Image (cartoon, helix red, strand yellow):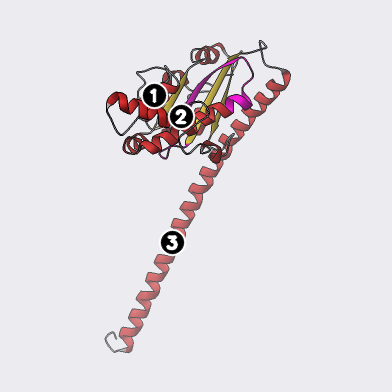
């Protein structure tokens, strides 16, 4: 049985850890050397693109330029989120515009397990168009972003993945190159299924996820009500001010003998 882990910036690691290798060098790959080699290959002084670095470091990895911020955290966290669409070359806007319908299926359902299994051992990254453009014009930024991403994968693997597990990685970046959201799905390993402790932890995570969605909806409703009350209060003050000004003008005219 496979289990997926989802997260967002700060969910598991502080942003500072992603910036640990800001010079563009990671423990696994020196991206400055790769960039120089690629530049020499192409005769291009600007060096290696972020896509080149990503797919050189992780051969066969998928690369999508689209606005991942359109995917709400609630949709991203769901078991039926169509993450498999990001592990193919012809992904279109329907993937980021996906909206859930109906109740969320259990992680143990055959449909969810099949979707997760289809992505195992693969990696995919979502890069917003604004960031893609920035990195084209700033090779140093591209190296920093790549170092951050690889550092995250390396650190997460070392601290949170059971030995022998085969994982898939779906990472969504924001317009500044930070990891905005991620999904790590694992299968295999030294045991055939989750322990009781893992099951309890998984159930607790599911309950917390549901609570976060409900709290988010409640805060949105409260915010909308506050805005409405503030608008009404502003309208009332404007009306009262207008009445006062008009009364003062009438009194001034009467005092000057203009109105009788």
- The answer to whether 252 appears left or right of 153 in the picture is left
The disc, 1 or 3, on the residue closer to the chain's N-terminal end is 1
**Residue 130, x across and y down, in percent:** 35, 37
The disc, 1 or 2, on the residue closer to the chain's N-terminal end is 2
In this rendering, the count of numbered labels is 3
**Residue 199, x across and y down, in percent:** 68, 20
Callout 2: 10 Å neighbours few (<14), some, many (20+)? some
Residue 72 shows up from this direction: no
Residue 30 is marked as 2
Judging depth in this view, the residue of 29 and 134 nearest the camera is: 29
- The answer to whether 110 appears left or right of 194 in the picture is left
Question: What's the residue at 61%, 22% (across, down)?
Answer: 161
Q: Residue 108 sits in which quadrant?
A: top right
Question: Which residue is label 3 attached to?
Answer: 234
The disc, 3 or 2, on the residue closer to the chain's N-terminal end is 2
Mark-to-mark CA distance, 3 and 2: 58 Å
**220 falls in the magenta region:** no
Q: Secondary structure at mark 2?
A: loop
Q: Secondary structure at mark 1?
A: strand
Q: Give the quarter of the figure containing the N terminus.
A: top right
Query: For the view shown, which residue lies furthest in the right direction?
Result: 196
Q: Secondary structure at mark 3?
A: helix
Judging depth in this view, the residue of 45 and 231 nearest the camera is: 45
Question: Which residue is label 1 attached to?
Answer: 63
Judging depth in this view, the residue of 98 and 11 nearest the camera is: 11
> What's drawn in magenta, residue-wise?
156-178
Placement of 26 over or under 60, stated as above or below = below
Question: What's the residue at 52%, 31% (across, down)?
Answer: 151
Q: Are marks 3 and 2 in contact (CB under 8 Å)?
A: no
**Residue 251, x across and y down, in percent:** 35, 83
Q: Are marks 1 and 3 in contact (CB under 8 Å)?
A: no
């Amino acid at each position: 049985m496979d289990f997926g882990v989802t997260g967002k910036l700060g969910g598991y690691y502080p942003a500072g850890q992603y910036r640990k290798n800001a010079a563009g060098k990671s423990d696994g790959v020196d991206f400055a050397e790769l960039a120089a080699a690629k530049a020499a290959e192409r005769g291009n002084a600007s060096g290696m693109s972020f896509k080149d670095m990503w797919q050189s470091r992780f051969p066969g990895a998928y690369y999508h330029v689209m606005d991942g911020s359109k995917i709400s955290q609630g949709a991203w966290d769901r078991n039926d989120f169509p993450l498999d669409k990001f592990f193919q070359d012809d992904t279109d806007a329907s993937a980021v515009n996906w909206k859930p319908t109906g109740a969320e299926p259990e992680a143990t359902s055959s449909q969810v397990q099949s979707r997760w299994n289809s992505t195992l051992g693969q990696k995919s990254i979502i890069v917003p168009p604004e960031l893609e453009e920035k990195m084209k014009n700033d090779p140093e930024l591209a190296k920093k972003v790549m170092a951050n991403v690889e550092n995250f994968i390396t650190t997460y693997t070392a601290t949170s993945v059971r030995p022998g597990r085969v994982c898939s990685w779906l990472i969504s970046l924001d317009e500044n190159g930070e990891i905005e959201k991620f999904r790590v799905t694992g299968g295999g390993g030294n045991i055939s299924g989750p322990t009781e402790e893992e099951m309890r932890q998984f159930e607790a995570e599911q309950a917390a996820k549901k609570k976060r969605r409900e709290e988010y909806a409640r805060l949105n409703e409260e915010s909308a009500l506050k805005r409405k009350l503030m608008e009404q209060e502003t309208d009332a003050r404007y009306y009262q001010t207008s009445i006062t000004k008009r009364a003062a003008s009438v009194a001034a005219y009467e005092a000057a003998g203009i109105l009788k």
